[in-house]
Image (spheres, helix red, strand yellow):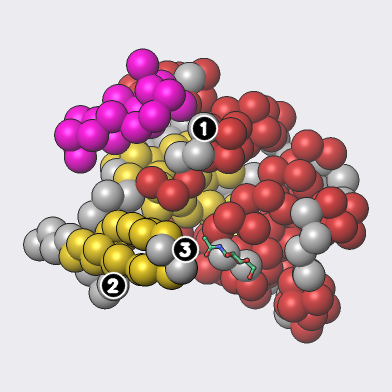
């Protein structure tokens, strides 16, 4: 159910009339946010290109994040050994470590700050947590404590389980689910032209055209 409460506040201060109209949706599910889920791994070149050249510019520069229920799942093509429980990543130990950093970032920051940090780290391909935290003035103390106190395998378990749900459907990462559905046929459009795809899906679902959409 969609319930929009409009508050119109009239403030008379020193002869100035201020009028603010506010839309609120307290405990309602965010009905006007399009769910986007990205399954990825920190070091795959296509994942890095997608996050830094498509997803982040769309979310930040085009301001789509407020209209998105964005979920990042940093696991990708990693595999868990059935007997040892150890996770092995496609691009080696560093990738598992970086995926775990992403996991801890996602656990301890909201998606706005998490995306800033993660996109910044993916631009480099090395562990640039300090540089990225400084750049955006984000306190990553809790993220560091998370990394220090837990094993990589433990941190990644949650993302492994999420990935298991769709891994049989996709042929590689990045894999992008839109409105909670993964569609293989859409992947090229999504990775090459994410913002246009987002605009079209958003308009189709909510019957609303977002700004700067064609
Ligand atoms: C891992 O173990 C489970 C249960 O012991 C088994 O069902 C599954 O097939 C195994 N997977 C692999 C990849 O060996
Ligand atoms: C995200 O967290 C930061 C830091 O706590 C806060 O300043 C910002 O307002 C939050 N953003 C959203 C959209 O909740």
Q: Residue at x 29, y 35 (%)?
A: 202
The quadrant of the rendering that contains the C terminus is top left
| Residue 30 position in % (x across, y down) | 29, 59
In this view, 183 is above or below 138: above
Q: Earlier in the sequence, mark 1 or mark 3?
A: 1
Mark 3 burial class by Cα count in 10 Å: few <14, some 14-19, many 20+:
few
Confirm whether residue 173 shows in the render. no
Determine the secondary structure under disc 2: loop
In the image, is residue 204 part of the stretch drawn in magenta?
A: yes
Q: Is residue 106 magenta?
A: no
- Can you give x and y, in whole percent of width and height, for residue 46 in the image? 64, 28
* Residue bounds of the magenta highlight: 195-214
User: What residue is disc 1 on?
Assistant: 62
Q: Identify residue for label 2.
A: 26
Q: Give the residue pinned by disc 3.
A: 161
Q: Residue at x 28, y 72 (%)?
A: 26
Residue at image position (25%, 63%) is 8
Q: Residues within 10 Å of mark 1 (few under 14, many from 20)?
A: some
Which quadrant of the structure image shows residue 189? top left
**Extreme residue toward the left, this view:** 1
**Lower position in the chain sequence, tag 2 or tag 1:** 2
Q: In this rendering, is residue 105 above or below 95? A: below
């Amino acid at each position: 159910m969609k319930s929009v409460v409009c508050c119109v506040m009239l403030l008379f201060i020193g002869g100035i009339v201020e009028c603010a109209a506010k839309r609120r949706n307290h405990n309602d599910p965010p009905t006007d946010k399009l769910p986007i889920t990205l399954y990825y791994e920190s070091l795959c070149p296509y994942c890095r290109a997608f996050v830094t050249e498509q997803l982040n510019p769309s979310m930040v520069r085009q301001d789509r994040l407020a209209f998105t229920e964005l979920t990042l799942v940093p696991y990708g093509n990693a595999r868990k050994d059935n007997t040892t429980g150890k996770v092995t990543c496609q691009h080696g130990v560093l990738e598992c470590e970086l995926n775990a950093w992403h996991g801890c970032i996602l656990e301890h920051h909201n998606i706005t700050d998490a995306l800033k940090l993660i996109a910044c780290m993916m631009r480099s391909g090395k562990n640039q947590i300090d540089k990225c935290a400084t750049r955006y003035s984000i306190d990553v103390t809790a993220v560091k404590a998370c990394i220090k106190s837990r094993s990589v395998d433990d941190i990644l378990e949650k993302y492994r389980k999420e990935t298991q749900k769709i891994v049989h459907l996709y042929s590689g990462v990045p894999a992008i689910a839109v409105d909670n559905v993964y569609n293989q046929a859409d992947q090229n459009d999504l990775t090459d032209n994410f913002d246009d795809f987002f605009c079209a899906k958003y308009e189709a679902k909510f019957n609303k055209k977002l700004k700067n959409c064609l």
